[in-house]
Amino acid sequence: MLLKVDGLIKDFGGLRALDSVSFEVREHELVGLIGPNGAGKTTLFNCISGHVPVTKGKILFDGKDITELPPHQRAKLGLARTFQVYAAQGDLNVLEYTMVGAFLRTNGRTKARDIALETLKELDLLPWKERKVSEIPVPGQKLVTMAVAVATNPKILLLDEVAAGLNPQEIGWVKGIISHIHKDLGITTVLIEHVMALVMDISERVVVLDAGRVIKEGRPQEVVNDPAVIKAYLGESFRLEETR
Amino acid sequence: MASEVLLQAIVAGLLFGMVLSVVALGLTIIFGVMDIVNFAHGEFLMIGMYTGLLVSQYTGADPLFALPVAAVIGGLLGYLCYWLFVRLLLRGPMLAQLLGTFGLMLFLRNLALLLFGSEDRSIQKGILVGKSVVIFGSCVVPSTKLGAAVLAVLAFLGTYLFIEKTKIGKALQATAINPHAARFMGISTDRMNALAWVIGGAGVTVAGGLLVNFWAVNPYVGLLFTMLAFTIVALGGFGSVPGAFFAGLIVGIITEFPGIWDAISLWTGWNWMYKVPMISFKYTWVYLAYFLIMLITPKGLFGWKR
Amino acid sequence: MEAIRNALDFKDLPRSEVYLSWAVALFLIIFPLLPFSSFAMATMIQFLIFAVYGMGWNTIGGYGGQVDLGKAQYVGIGAYTTTVALIRWDIPFWVSMPLGMAISVLWSFMIGYPLFKLKGHYFAIATIATSLVLKDLFEVWGFVGAARGLHISPVKYPPPDFLRLIFKEDVYYYYLLLGFFFLAVFVMNWFRHSALGYRLRCIKDNEEVAKALGINVHWAKIKTYALATAYVSAMGSVHAMYIKNIEPEDTMSLDISVLIALMAMLGGAGSLWGPIIGAAVLVPMKSYLKEWMGAKMGLIGIDLIIYGFIIMVIAAVEPKGLWGLYERWKGKRSAP
Amino acid sequence: MKRLFLALGFLALFLALFLMEKGAYAQDEITIGVIYPLTGGAASAGRELQMGAELAMEIANGKMPELAMDMAKEAGIKSMGGKKIKLIFKDHEGNPTLGADLAKKLILDDKVVGILGCYHSSVTKAVSAVCEQYGVPMINDSSTSPVLTRQGYKWFWRTTPHDGTFTMDLFEFLKGLSEGKAKGVKPVPKEELMNLAAACEKTEWGSAASQLLEDYAKKYGYNLKRNLLYTAKSADLSSEVRSLLAVNPDAMLFASYTSDAILMVKTLKAQKAKPKLIWGQNAGFDTPEFRSTLGEDIVGILTRTVFSPKLGEVKTISTQINELYKKKAGYDLSDASSRGFTGVQTWFHVLEKAGSTKPEDIQRAANSIEIPGEQLVVPWKGIKFATSGEEPGQNIMGSGIIGQYQKNKEGQVVLEIVYPFELSTANLIYPFPGY
Amino acid sequence: MEELLRTSEVEIRYGSLPVVQGVSIRVNSGQCVSVLGSNGSGKSSLLRGIMGAQRVSKGEIFWKKREIQGLRTEAIVKLGLVYVPEQKMLFGPLSVLENLMLGAYLIKDQELIRANLKHVFELFPRLEERIYQRASTLSGGEQQMLAIGRGLMSNPKLLMLDEPSLGLSPLLVKELLGTVARLKQEGIPILLVEQNVKEALHIADYGYVLQAGRLVLEGPSSELLASDLIRSAYLGL
């Protein structure tokens, strides 16, 4: 068991964003995390990566309780993530930015550079290496943040909506990269995604969150046909029969 | 004796604090409405002080009558500053805002230096100048200070009522709380920002007009008050108007800490206390207070916004 | 070893910039041989001092995006350490300067820890506050001469004295400062390429992302702040030996902090050449405007009026400063 | 190509900037650099000094046989073939670093023969160090911190007596007061004047003055209950005054520059302070601005000084110069202007004696001149610099007086001399009338 | 049926990322139109674009046949388009009444304001009970009521509701959408953005379905309800 979330509760003021969420990610798995707007997916990521403190519950990573650790220490243990909305402002170029990730494992500039170049090559981003992150289009930025996360050499990678706003062709491209990261680099991946075409296609297992609770867990096909899931997405009284 | 000294210090601190709260009023409104820190705030105050001084000097009228003039000049200045300059800064990052208001500070300060010279100047004639009021015993208060404090409270109350009781005041508050939502109500945020600068500018120049009754003015006077105002705004809570008032009083008393120290040393009779040059730390405590407040309660006493 | 290689590695700069820097370096080296007035010399010395101050500021303020307006306190600590050490115990400059740096860095750790819990404006104002508190303290502390300050007597320490760094002619100070200046550029170049430098630039961009990449944001800021401090403190020490008369009101005034920050910001925060350009433009402008229009025409303060106005325009038009303007211009040229 | 021209243009401009800065003055003039605070908190004193110095320069360069002064007899410096003195004024704003920069510039770029200045003791200290380094003679006319002549400098001479003398005068005065020596006042028991409180500005001058008060109070057996330092630039002194009043002092002693002296008296008035004596260590307490701003509020205040128009009653030269000065400035000579005048006068005598502008000659001349008291506007026995002992370069013939502001018959406020007792021009007002 | 609002080939970008592409919708007087789509499909961006709160990079927006693209938000509000935002955007520290009065900021006529207030309290009696309470202390449902009430205070000529049911319990959703239905009955034109497909379509006359920023389906509500495409738009099947 690589990651285990146990009875996680997160309150914002009076609002309970996560309510006793428990789920597990096994090594070398690719898990999709879906759910309607406001279900608490990103909050869950923030709790796991340590960007927001949890109210109650436990997070175990690689057999270690990381609930109280600050984010940078979690990253050192091998937990990497990307962000949903992140538009770079700074003047780092793609290579330099990827090197920041590589510096987690080494302090030498040459070595970091080598790691970064290799990562960029793996993800087919080499042609962009001299360009400033803030100057490339947002879908590209998302790929770069993935590359940076991969450059930290993580055990697990949490991807937050990498395909949002991409066109089908680009989605295909991203899909390829994700499965490359997962299969060839052997990095366990958790994926938040709204683009169902992507999630359903590559996830081995899907966890559905609604209103802060896990309402369903299982293989993609199972999940989409689950009445509870459909209800969560399409509304109270929506029945499958009506649409047929 | 000790209690008299203590009382004197506290009275003086409160009176000064009342004026200070008007100094901070504009800063807290501008900050509240548009999240921008105006480092030139003290320079506006300095302009108010010169206005009070010059108007009374050339017309022979009492400096207190110069207050409306100061308010108009300050308001106008704030308005111009907003439309010509600050509006452009808002597009940039925080670094540019800091840089810009610093530039404004240097500009105004040295303009005053060019126009008025670097000498200290103070009011010589006036209804209140040179008179004192005995509150009781040896507790003597200069009438200028008392008058300024009373008018300060009135000015503060006026502004407070304007913000709390009028429609435009409410719109200003709404802009401060959430400018996007305010826009959806049909409130022009640009106009509200300008209004904040007008009120801010007028408030602080009026404070300057009050201050000049008992405080000498030179082009460099602004910085001290900028720092005092920042402390008050931090203590009262960024953007909080009533907070500014009470925090002003507290900071006023902090500046009179040497008097309190004297009272304690008289009380206890400890001679070593006389040797501590507490008077040199008059404002040091204020700066320290800012630092500590920001670390302990970043939202201040009345803050609703950070 | 790699650190030194990094420090000397300017390969990532465009060729034109490299040539230009060679030209500037050459000019700086031969400058004292040219027939200039002592005033020009003094101005150049000011330029070198402020360029190094600005480079120090640039690490935390430019690359880190933390606007620090309290650098004067470190100028003060550096200046006072060397001067006190010289006057009280006759410790030579070359020992007391590192000592001053150590004390400054220690102090920066002490106040940096709480300081960096604050962000943005709050941080900027808090740095002013700490600097003022320290200044007030120095103004009453008899050991360091209180408000009357300290004074290095030319009788007690006759020039030239290479150990204590006491010279009569400015040219000695000039070359010494030039050495420091080049060193500072190299250290800056190293910093730019070091893990810390990269991390800091990432922090400036987005702290949350930085955290997720395993960067201890608070600690990285404190470390960089210490580096900035070391720069400023070392220059403060030299500055003290140069002016030979230090007092809190002058050495530790907020004006110094503001000038340091402004020069770097105006030149271009977060770029290698920014602080140098800022100092190269502003220092001569300030002193010559002051001399011509201030002293000769009686327009007191005109230097800072123009100065302030330029800063306002730059802030409103191009937040990245003069270097930003240059880059934009270059970008426009290369775009079509 | 366009870019190259642009770059070249900038470079040319840059070089031009530097090259334009080279002062050249006519050879037939002897230039003296004068560094005074022409702006800032002590600007009014600076202007006084400047006008005094200019008046002396006019007299030295012109011919006014009606004046009983060596300086007035011939135009220019006789020993150098009638060369004229030219003063280059610079403004140090009360900032020592700026002062030192200006001195360097005067010495290296303007090639001045010597320096005069600088009022603020702190600035004088910095400037004198520069002069010492470059071996350029400096005469100080107006700084009174005793430290200045104790630095072992070979190129520094001071005409004015320092605060040691003035402070001793004060305590002698207090002592005389209890012995009944003061004109028109019955002996005051020492117990009545036992408790003193002092406030001095906190730079070089004030902190030295503060230390002297402490020392002399101990020596003379008085109780200095409070001795605080304050910032001359502060715009509000109410807590300082309250702190002084908290110890219920019999006499209040101050060392203040101009604007803070005015503020101090105003605050005393607003607080209804009523000590028996108020004494000012000159500087601020003896500027025309102090008098004109505060008017009758200063009646009864004592100040140490080196000049009072009343001196004319004993010294004709003082009256004559005062008349000339009045024509120029519109009001009487003051402490500052008379010292500035005397400073240039001393320079004249030194140059006359040296006969050349070589620093060594000037040094030799300065160490050996002796200007008799009757040539001076100030009430000193003369000017003669110590060449050995504790204070080389200090004028050993200087002395101070203590004046008191009193209202004369015409209702004007004038400075009457009350100490030395034998020079008294009026009865002492004691105790201080209060507000 | 007079045309009120029409967008034509609108494109909105966040940076270089297009979130709305070539979307044309139309609202006629007296009509309730619903815009549907899963999250991230660009519904809210579209509304914000119409309100001038989001820069529209391409396309045109007409209000009563007049081009309003490029106007400032304040000016658009003045025309009578009222937006009730997704995150409610209440003025938390102010009271319920003050919030409502700010909704009527542009109205000068005191009588009208009083009448509107009465109308709002009639629709949401619970708001009247909490009239002096701070908005931030209200429950989620009450906050949504206040947001709608505030919108109604300015006599809207078109009310744009952005996911009013978000984060509410099923019971509250029913109640709230009931109120929306009532508003429609009263003749107020409504543009409703909802996730809650079924409920929304029951109220609306016409619907548009967005997927990844593009219009994939449109038609009268009854037709949409019967369509299979809607499911694929949401669940990607």
Image (tube, rainbow, N blue to C red):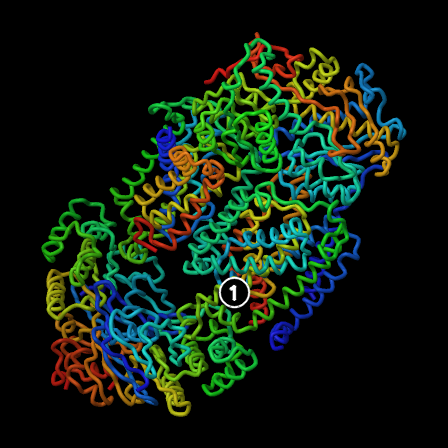
Q: Using residue A165 as the reference point, say whether residue D363 is left or right of it.
A: right
Query: What's the residue at 31%, 58% (across, down)?
Result: B180
Q: Using residue B125 as the reference point, say whether residue D184 is left or right of it.
A: right
x, y percentage for residue C61?
51, 60
For mark 1, what is the residue?
C224
x, y percentage for residue E226?
14, 82
Q: Is residue D48 visible?
A: yes
Q: Pointer 1: residues within 10 angstroms few (<14), some, or many (20+)?
A: many
Q: Using residue B43 as the reference point, say whether residue D90 is left or right of it.
A: right
Q: Using residue B149 as the reference point, say whether residue E196 is left or right of it.
A: left
x, y percentage for residue B93?
45, 59
Tell me the SS state at disc 1: helix
Q: Quadrant of the C terminus of chain D?
A: top left
Q: Is residue C307 above or below residue A206?
A: above
Label 1 resides on the chain identified as C
Q: Amino acid at mark 1?
A: Thr
